[in-house]
Image (cartoon, rainbow, N blue to C red):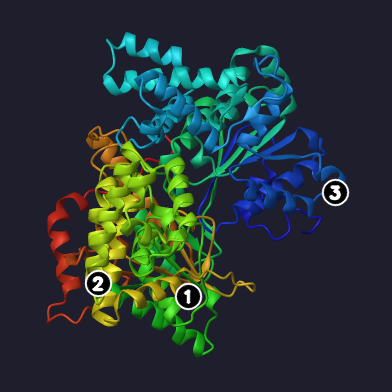
Amino acid sequence: MSQDYLTGLTPAQKSAVEHLDGAAIVLAGPGSGKTRVITHRIAHLVEHHEISPTHVVAITFTNKAANEMRERVQGAVPKARAKKIVISTFHSLGARILRAEHERAQLSSGFTICDDDDTKSYLVQATAIVTEKDKKEIRGWKDWRNPDCSKRFISRLKSHLITPDEYFDQLMDQGGGDEKEFFYAKVYDKYNYFLRRNQSVDFDDLIMRTVRLLRDDEDVRTKYSTWTRHLLVDETQDTSVSQYEMVKYLASHWGNVFVVGDGDQSIYAFRLAQPKNLKLMERDYKDVSVYFLEENFRSTPPIAEVANSVIAHNPDRPDKSIKPVIKEGSPVRCVVYQDNRQEGAAVVDEITSAVRAGQAEFRDFALLYRAHFRSRIFEELLVTHNVPHKVVGGIGFYNRATVKDILAYLRLVVNGADESSFIRIYNKPPRRFGEVSYAKFYTAKEERNLTVMQAFKKRLHDEVLTGQARAGAEELRRIFKSLRTMPKDKVAPIIEQAAKLSGYATHLKKDSTEKGIDKLNHLQELIAAAHEFDATHGAGLLRFLEWAALMQSTDEETDGNHVHLMTCHAAKGLEFKQVYVVGATDGLMPIIKDTDDYGNPKSEGQLQEDLEEERRIFFVALTRAERELTVTWPRRELRFNQYMDCMPSPFIEEMGDTVAYADMSNTNAGSYLLRALDAKKRRGRGRRRGKRRQAGWR
């Protein structure tokens, strides 16, 4: 980076970098160079204005982002000074303050920061006390009482800085809460007891306890707000209530807070992000300066136009848009296919054809989808076409736990000596055949030199096990006796029976959480894959297992030249020359649940907020593209051996009139695509005639 920190900046970027005192909001659209603005501003403060680097604090969300920002700053500021600048995540800064002020925070100097396993263990113990139930039973719960639901509820309370006692008081003031609210209040209270007893804090506490300390202890607040002469915050649209309060207290002395964000890219409501925090800045700070970074250095005009058209349908947003610097580009394509298999084949064929022709490299392509299970067909086709690829920020379909569990049942059907598969599923789903019982069973069969299936055939479990463990083992024996007698020429019926007889499908259906729904989708996709295999190959169970093992191979590409597969969320902050947004069907784009995580019906306002967030997710996916953008969806999908008709995402029609539509579904004249879009337009024409609301920053 040049020592002249203003060289090469656009006028808008330069204005933001030169801002010195007072609060500032930088509304930075995708591809507008926001990280450059932050790092240039830090350098400008330290080198030009000679602000002491120890009094410059920059906060971002991930360790990766903090490290990247630190590297850029070290390239702009002499190393000795750069090391003194505090560049941190919210949580690490909170930990730093709590560690330094542990006595005032009523913590030991060596307090422990809980990991996810610690947190879940404490929640299970707390739930056991509240319900007087066995911890093993609690771990198997799939309703609103399960520890994951409690964790989300408690996180929401901590995000709003509410202690257990304060929550109890709120319930009393409101005339008493319902069964769920009182349950979570009690679990929260006991959970906090275990944290205190073990001198531990969880990740939510790193923010909550820091904010309450800054709020309630004037000496601490004065110390840290005086220290923080200039505060810079990245991705402000993703801050929660507690994180916003942390920023407010740190900036309370000097008032020099410089926040960068884009409400149109706020896609983390499930992490309690509040995009309205950008607007709250005007309420909480005097004479806020607002800078717009609208110039886009990433995408072509057609991509920018489509993205602008989509996000304009969200109300209450500032009057801003993406303005591409690049002068021309190819039209955005929207393509409908007969089914998801044809969709996948066409996309993979386009990629391989472009690479063979020397027009692109594999690293240029990204396939973005809304839910993980949609990667399955693309992974299979990329493997069979020997295309290097990587599932980014996730696990490949055939490496997912649900898929591997069912495949373990299948491997035992063809190989009764497969001990590793048996270890994986002997108590999945739970059948009271636990580790101790398995150890007895294993020792006895090894002494007799028997395989698992031989031991079952000789009913060894009747000799060495008792009670519920014997019943669980007997249940397994019957399951495999039934499965092993089935014809092996068709795979799908065996998978369906394995999921049914084992209770695995029923077990998944009981879990109404987002994780549970994902797992059930993975099971449905595996069954769909088996039906496709039966129809295409007809080679039987053994060949299917060989094929699945090939799909599980995930050798890393050392040179990084691979096709990228990821969810729309995982793509945030990334960019690719050619992007395919696949599986753009109504029901996946958007995904909107009628109930919340605790089974309560959502209000109309909540459903509208969900729709707006889903539109932002789609917007983020579109704006990852640099040169080529294609949105695809199937006319129908195979689920549980039945083809389900699909409608295009409602966001498709919001993309505007410049999109190049293509119908590859081989339907009769009249075009399924145009009929579907016309039908949606007729239903919503009156609503869409309303003028876009120019809320601005009032």
- Marks 1 and 2, the one that precedes in the sequence: 1
Q: Which residue is mark 2?
A: 531
Q: Which residue is mark 3?
A: 79
Residue for point 81% across, 45% down: 82
Decide which of 482, 278 is in the foreground and name it.
482
Amino acid at pointer 3: Lys
Amino acid at pointer 1: Glu
Dot 1: element? loop
Q: Quadrant of the C terminus?
A: top left
Comparing marks 1 and 3, which lies closer to the viewer?
A: 3
Q: Residues within 10 Å of mark 1 (few under 14, many from 20)?
A: few
Q: CA distance from mark 1 to mark 3?
A: 41 Å
In the rendered image, which quarter is residue 290 located in?
A: top right
Residue for point 41% across, 82% down: 350
Instruction: In the rendered structure, find residue 369 and report the number of the disc placed on it.
Output: none
Comparing marks 1 and 2, which lies closer to the viewer?
A: 2
Q: CA distance from mark 1 to mark 2?
A: 45 Å
Q: CA distance from mark 2 to mark 3?
A: 60 Å
Q: Which residue is mark 1?
A: 328
Q: Residue 77: x and y, percent?
A: 81, 49
Q: Residues within 10 Å of mark 2 (few under 14, many from 20)?
A: many
Q: Residue 357: x and y, percent?
A: 50, 90
- Marks 2 and 3, the one that precedes in the sequence: 3
Q: Quadrant of the N terminus?
A: bottom right
For this view, does 77 lie left or right of residue 639?
Answer: right
Dot 3: element? helix
